Image: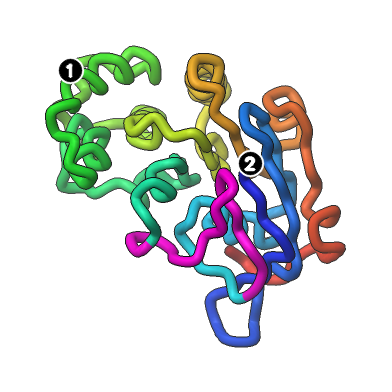
């Protein structure tokens, strides 16, 4: 279970962008978090992905309460969550070839010997071709780069996925392909999903249930995130 209990979080003292949010995702469940731009949902997604320490509240992952964040979190918790962000060009190192971008988590966790195996499995799944793997981010489209970022999120076979506006900048065909790749992975592994977005139709078609931002906190949110 991925559990967020009464989470308050922000980026400056005494100016939280999330106040008292509670949300749970069961194993194998797909939950959509729907809200307008700037309401705080991306901040909550970063908390769920163990990338941002909340100011208050509790995060519990598979029965273990999270007490440290980012690189300080235990490896077993860090690698349990894969995350895909809205803007691939801000989340991809421009110096890396796509093959190295995808393999980055494997190398960071000392699993270099699995690079070829995981690339061979993931590249066709996300809709990339072998010729693209030698290119750098500036040499591919936004859609191709987001496919690589999704592969990077899946490379460690996480039990949980957090997709924060993953398809917001993409066309309809690329959106459909990425959602299909996520669902293929979830069908294979039973991974749970938190999909954050502002497209009600997409979330309601994709997810088992959709939660509106106001239902979490009773507040629409104030600050851009």
Q: Is residue 58 magenta?
A: yes
At numbered mark 1, what does the secondary structure look like: helix, strand or loop?
helix
Q: Quadrant of residue 22?
A: bottom right
Q: Position of residue 162 (x, y in %)?
A: 54, 42
Residue 131 marker: 1
Q: Quadrant of the C terminus?
A: bottom right
* Mark in the foreground, 2 or 1: 2
Q: Residues within 10 Å of mark 2 (few under 14, many from 20)?
A: some
Q: Is residue 3 left or right of residue 68?
A: right
Residue receiving disc 2: 1
Q: Position of residue 183 (x, y in %)?
A: 56, 20
**Label 2 – label 1 distance at C-alpha:** 39 Å
Question: Which mark sits nearer the N-terminus, 2 or 1?
Answer: 2
Q: Residues within 10 Å of mark 1 (few under 14, many from 20)?
A: few
Contact? badges 2 and 1 (CB < 8 Å) = no
Tell me which residue sits at (78%, 32%) in the image. Answer: 209
Q: Is residue 113 magenta?
A: no
Outermost residue on the front side: it is 63
Whether residue 88 is visible to the viewer of this picture, yes or no, is: yes
Which residues lie in the magenta part?
56-72
Q: Is residue 101 left or right of residue 208?
A: left
Q: Position of residue 164 (x, y in %)?
A: 55, 45
Compare residues 19 and 109 and report the one nearer the observer.
Answer: 109
Compare residues 129 and 17 and report the one nearer the observer.
Answer: 17
Q: Position of residue 154 (x, y in %)?
A: 39, 31
């Amino acid at each position: 279970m991925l559990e967020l209990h009464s989470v308050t979080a922000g980026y400056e003292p005494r100016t939280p962008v999330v106040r008292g949010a509670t949300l749970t995702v069961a194993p194998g469940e797909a939950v959509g978090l729907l809200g307008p731009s700037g309401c705080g949902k991306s901040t909550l997604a970063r908390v769920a992905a163990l990338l941002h320490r909340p100011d208050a509240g509790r995060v519990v992952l598979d029965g273990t309460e999270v007490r440290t964040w980012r690189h300080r979190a235990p490896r077993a918790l860090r690698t349990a969550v894969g995350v895909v962000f809205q803007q691939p060009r801000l989340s991809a190192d421009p110096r890396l070839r796509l093959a190295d971008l995808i393999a980055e988590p494997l190398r960071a966790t000392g699993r270099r010997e699995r690079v070829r195996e995981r690339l061979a499995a993931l590249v066709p799944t996300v809709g990339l071709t072998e010729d693209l793997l030698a290119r750098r981010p500036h040499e591919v489209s936004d859609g191709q780069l987001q496919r690589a970022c999704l592969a990077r999120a899946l490379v460690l076979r996480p039990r949980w996925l957090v997709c924060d506006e993953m398809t917001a900048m993409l066309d309809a065909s690329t959106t459909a392909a990425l959602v299909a790749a996520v669902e293929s992975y979830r069908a294979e592994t039973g991974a749970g999903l938190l999909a954050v977005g502002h497209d009600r139709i997409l979330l309601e078609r994709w997810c088992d249930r959709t939660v509106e931002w106001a239902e979490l906190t009773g507040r629409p949110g104030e600050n851009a995130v």
